[in-house]
Image (cartoon, grey):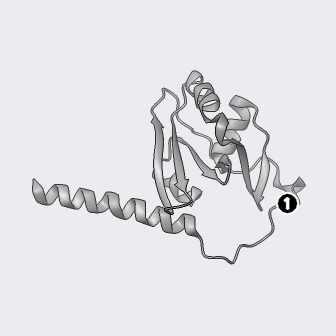
Amino acid sequence: MMEFLQEKNESKIVLCNVGKFYTAIGRDAILLNKILGLKLNCLKSEICKVGFPINSLEKYTDLICQQRYSFIVFYFNQESNKLEILMDYNGKNNNKIFQYNNNCYTCLKGKKEYKKPDKYMEALKELYKCKSQYKIDKKIQS
C-alpha cells in the first residue's frame, strides 16, 4: 500500500499509520533519516522504514515543515477499514531521493512473508475508487 501511495504522491514524503505508529518506507524513510535523524529499520529485504508514535505526529510534521519538504499523511481507520488523508502540505522542497534502502546487506530482519488478506490494500482501493467516481460524477454534471 505504501509503495502505491508513494507512486501517487511521488514528490512528497508519505506517512501512514500502522497500529500506534506513523511510518514511512523506502525513499521517504531514507530522507526522514537524513533530515530528522529518525532511526532506520528493515521492513523487508531491501526496504527501509522509519516510524514514530501517533501522538508525536504534530511534532514531526512541524519539523518536516521547518525543513520545507512536501508531505502527505494518511490515516487508516481500523474500525471502518477506510483510508483518509489527514494532512497534505506542499513545501518548497520535494523528495528527490531514489534510494530505497540504506544498507540491506547488514540487515537480517524483514524476511517474513505475510499471507493474510491485506485490509490496507482494500482501503486504498476504496479511497481511489471514490475519488475517480467523484471525478466522473463531476464531469457528468458539468
Q: Quadrant of residue 2?
A: bottom right
Q: Which residue is found at the position 22% from the left and 61% from the top?
A: 136
Q: Residues within 10 Å of mark 1 (few under 14, many from 20)?
A: few
| 90 to 28, vertically: above or below | above
Residue 125 picture location, percent across and down: 44, 66
User: Residue lying furthest front in this view?
Assistant: 79
Q: Which residue is found at the position 11% from the left and 56% from the top?
A: 141
Total numbered labels: 1
Q: Which residue is mark 1?
A: 109
Q: Which residue is found at the position 55% from the left and 26% from the top?
A: 65
Residue 44 as seen in the image, left or right of residue 134:
right
Q: Quadrant of the N terminus?
A: bottom right
Residue 106 picture location, percent across and down: 89, 54
User: Residue lying furthest left in this view?
Assistant: 142
| 60 to 20, vertically: above or below | above
Residue 107 as seen in the image, left or right of residue 72:
right
Residue 21 picture location, percent across and down: 68, 47
Q: Quadrant of residue 42?
A: bottom right
What kind of residue is marked 1?
A: Lys
Q: Nearer the viewer, residue 1 or 127?
A: 127
User: Residue lying furthest top in this view?
Assistant: 66
Q: Which residue is found at the position 48% from the left and 26% from the top?
A: 92
- Circle 1 — which element? loop
Residue 107 picture location, percent across and down: 87, 55
Q: Nearer the viewer, residue 11 or 127?
A: 127
Residue 36 as seen in the image, left or right of residue 15:
right
